[in-house]
Image (spheres, grey):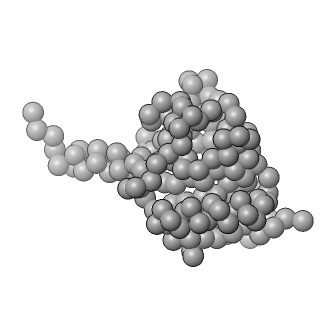
Amino acid sequence: MRLPAILIFTLLLLTGCTGIPEGVTVVDGFELPRYLGTWHEIARLDHSFERGLSDIRAEYSLREDGGVKVLNSGFDAETNQRRSAEGKAYFIDGPDRGRLKVSFFGPFYGAYNIIALDKANYQYAMVAGPDRSYLWILARTPELAQPTLDSLVDQARNLGFATDQLIFAAPRH
């Protein structure tokens, strides 16, 4: 049986969207219960879905089906309102690896690859998408100690991410 070309293309596209950038590895020994809760965006590479937003947060909680509920939100100064998007995530390689697929739009999934994590205290994480155009540095607090941030940026640079294009969250006082 031959698959139609469009179906093959779609399968390749969807598989590619949940991949890992070449040469990048995800964390092992991941513990979802410790990761749940609120994370603040410290830095990111630019994407249209976050443009114009500040005070960006991600909140993770368990879903009844065993997946993870994802609630991303950010403050839109133009409308003076908080905007949010709800999604769902599921493990790709098992619950002890920081590799999930996340969806905000029906059956379409994107990669959520945790490539650095404070395993001792779960206070910071670095997340990549399926390629090097997606990168986020997250922390449990709105600010991250400069030496830790510098170390994560160096790590991302060494992995080939365009760290000179990172957008850093403004410090909150």
Residue 121 horizontal side relative to residue 15, left or right: right
Residue 127 in picture, x, y percent from top left:
57, 52
User: In the picture, which quadrant includes the N terminus?
Assistant: top left
Number of marks in the image?
0
Q: Is residue 8 visible?
A: yes
63 shown above or below 39? above
Quick one: which residue is furthest to the right in this view? 173
Quick one: which residue is furthest to the bottom in this view? 164
| x 54%, y 50%: residue | 115
Residue 10 horizontal side relative to residue 116, left or right: left
100 shown above or below 24? above
21 shown above or below 14? below
Nearer-the-camera pick, 108 or 121: 121
| x 61%, y 23%: residue | 64
Nearer-the-camera pick, 70 or 20: 20
| x 11%, y 38%: residue | 2
Residue 57 in picture, x, y percent from top left:
71, 52
159 shown above or below 122? below
| x 78%, y 60%: residue | 145
Q: Is residue 55 visible?
A: no
Residue 107 in picture, x, y percent from top left:
43, 40
User: In the picture, which quadrant includes the C terminus?
Assistant: bottom right
Nearer-the-camera pick, 52 or 90: 90
Residue 84 in picture, x, y percent from top left:
68, 51
Quick one: which residue is furthest to the left in this view? 1
